[in-house]
Image (spheres, helix red, strand yellow):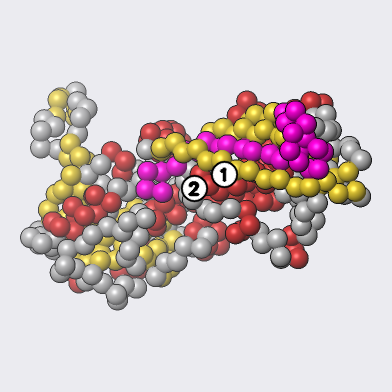
Amino acid sequence: MTAPTFPIFSIPAALIVAAGKGERAGGEVPKQYALLGGVPVIARAVDAFAGMPVHVVIGEGQRAMLDAALGQREVASVTTGGAERRDSVRAGLATIDDADVVLIHDAARPLLPRAVIDRLLAALDGADGAVPVLPVADTLTREGEIVDRAALMRVQTPQAFRLDAIRAAHDAWAGSMATDDAQVARARGMTVAEVAGDPLLDKITLPADFARAEALLAARLISRSAMGFDVHRFEAGEELWLGGILVPHDRGLSGHSDADVVLHALTDALLGAIGEGDIGSHFSPSDPQWRGARSSVFLAHARDLIRARGARIDYVDVTIICEAPRLAPYREAMRQEIANVLVLHLHSVSVKATTTERLGFAGRGEGIAAQAIATVRVPEAL
């Protein structure tokens, strides 16, 4: 992942304001902790500022939700906000001591293009602050009268400022509730430049906004396909697990785990689609904790890695290669088990079986092989 470039004069930090309750968005948790394309909204906002320290302001009692949402992501500080947005911003600004420029951003705008960050920081070369804006496209009226929209702009975040100046502006604010930080800055006499914003930055407020953001995300994904292959030999006294299903047979497959060649091949295909190596690099065959483990654990791990990258599994296809046993009676059960683990519709899973016409190790009945292919849509930067 390539980090954004910064003007040479500045040491930037990000301040993400995530202290709201997000009640209008609905859902069981505040919107900043809800999933967007399989990734929490707040996590997407943090990821957007890769390459700089990120400070987060949260609501009272939200620390556990934040930790769960961020996973292994690290932030420079976490502060509890106040009753109003400006109170939260002030609390966050007080924690920053590692920068001379700050980008103040609403967590509810998680789809932040890095080009917007670059434009904001570049604009600080000639101004005290900078904000991203978009022109108003709709016709506007006030009490039935058409309002000239030529001079109107929609203001977005992040908003960039010299840290000392915006901190002083907030301390000196004597007005009523401020709707954004640029308003506070201008009241202090600071110059605020306007740069081109981006429709991706539209705020998530209502349930319909999640659907819009999901559609925008989907439009930015690119398709990748990867293959997986696995083989295990037959061994007397072992159970035969294929596609997560216990198949009756006089022999099973030998392996450190349950030796499910179908799920092993499929796991490798999924890991390959996101460049995450193979199954052995995640679950070492020398690690005793995986002895006899169900291979659905491995498949679920690959699924979770894909989700954490903001990627989506579109389709998986497996071919099982063996002379015996006859697998047709178990094919649909395998499809359903794989669909359950990957949280896919059944029509997105294909399982087939074939023989080698009695050629090779499979033809001689020495073992079973499986090959798989997975199609996954991933973010362009992945």
Q: Residue 121, image x and y in percent? A: 19, 59
Instruction: Based on the picture, tell me whether residue 146 belongs to the magenta stretch.
Output: no
The answer to which of 358 and 303 lies nearer the viewer is 358
- Where is residue 118, by image quadrant? bottom left
Residue 139 in sight here: yes
Residue under label 1, please give it: 270
**Is 94 situated above or below 289?**
below
- What's drawn in magenta, residue-wise? 353-382
Q: Residue 206, image x and y in percent? A: 42, 37
Q: Residue 357, image x and y in percent? A: 75, 28
Q: Amino acid at mark 2?
A: Ile
The answer to which of 346 and 94 lies nearer the viewer is 346
Residue ranking furthest to the front: 359
In the structure shown, which secondary structural element does the residue marked by tag 2 occupy?
loop
Residue under label 2, please give it: 274
Q: Amino acid at mark 1?
A: Leu
- At label 2, counting other C-alpha atoms closer than 10 Å, the crowd grade (few under 14, some 14-19, many 20 or more) is many
Residue 182 in sight here: no
- Where is residue 220, by image quadrant? top left
**Is 338 situated above or below 52?**
above
Q: Residue at x 44, y 36 (%)?
A: 223
Q: Is residue 2 left or right of residue 301?
A: left
Q: Residue 50, image x and y in percent? A: 35, 60
